[in-house]
């Protein structure tokens, strides 16, 4: 099965005030960090939803429509060459290889697609006609609620996977300066505890 990794990085970062993809963690941008994370998995290729030099990029067909717009552009471009997409957002800096690998394993059991109960991302989406049609319908709607990720997961009946509650911090987003500060604090706490133990 050919699975393409996708880092969603085409947003406006309006709540953050600066481009989230270019935020630095351990002297590495969040974009580079998440591309490296997906590149370490058993995926066929890794793409960036957005426009950044030095990466395999896929630009939105319909700009400013949020994550669903990015997913739609990736589905449109990759549909004929891949079987599924492994999708993560650029603003999830604490996501690790263990969470990604485990979701890949679960996808073998649940080919309709998978995601974690604690978060809409990461998600594994099989490239199907149903997905194509759903995205076209959702993006054509004038109502924002039709473009929610939660609606996508429910309509396409992706399988929610339970994960250790103690590791739920891995799914923290950094949409605002406050959330980014929280993520940095958590990251340094984890690093410190590992160094002590």
Image: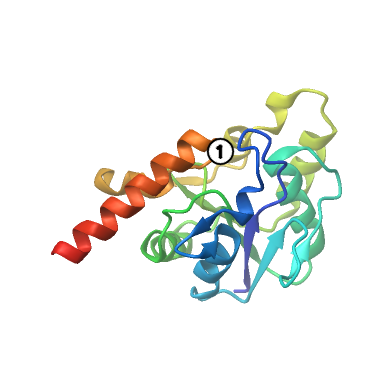
Query: Considering depth in this image, is 96 or 85 the residue closer to the camera?
Result: 96
**Vertically, is 61 above or below 106?**
above
Q: Which residue shows up at 57% across the image and 74% down it?
A: 43
Query: Considering depth in this image, is 41 or 152 the residue closer to the camera?
Result: 41
- The residue under label 1 is 175
SS type, badge 1: loop
The answer to whether any part of residue 162 appears in the image is: no
Query: Considering depth in this image, is 185 or 123 the residue closer to the camera?
Result: 185
Residue 56: % across, % down: 74, 70
Q: Which residue shows up at 63% across the image and 33% down it?
A: 15
The answer to whether any part of residue 164 appears in the image is: yes
Q: Which residue shows up at 71% across the image and 50% down it?
A: 71
Q: Which residue shows up at 83% across the image and 43% down it?
A: 63
Residue 62: % across, % down: 85, 44
**Vertically, is 116 above or below 5?**
above
Residue 119: % across, % down: 46, 41
Work out which quarter of the rendered image holds the N terminus and state it. Answer: bottom right
| Image-quadrant location for residue 52 | bottom right
Residue 188: % across, % down: 32, 54
Mark 1: give few (<14), some (14-19) or many (20+) Cα within 10 Å: some
Residue sitting farthest toward the front: 27
């Amino acid at each position: 099965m050919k699975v393409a990794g996708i880092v969603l990085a085409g947003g406006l970062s309006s709540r953050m005030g600066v481009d989230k993809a270019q935020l630095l963690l351990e002297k590495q941008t969040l974009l580079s960090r998440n591309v490296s994370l997906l590149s370490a998995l058993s995926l066929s290729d890794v793409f960036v939803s957005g426009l950044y030099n030095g990466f395999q990029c896929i630009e939105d067909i319909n700009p400013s429509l949020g994550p669903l717009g990015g997913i739609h552009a990736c589905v449109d471009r990759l549909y004929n060459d891949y079987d599924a997409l492994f999708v993560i957002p650029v603003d999830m800096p604490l996501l690790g290889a263990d969470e990604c690998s485990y979701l890949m394993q679960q996808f073998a059991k649940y080919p309709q697609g998978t995601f974690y109960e604690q978060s809409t991302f990461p998600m594994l989406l099989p490239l199907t006609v149903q997905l194509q049609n759903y995205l076209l319908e959702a993006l054509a709607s004038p109502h924002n609620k039709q473009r929610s990720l939660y609606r996508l997961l429910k309509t396409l009946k992706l399988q929610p996977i339970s994960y250790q509650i103690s590791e739920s911090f891995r799914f923290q987003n950094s949409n605002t300066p406050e959330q980014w500060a929280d993520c940095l604090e958590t990251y340094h706490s984890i690093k410190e505890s590992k160094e002590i133990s």
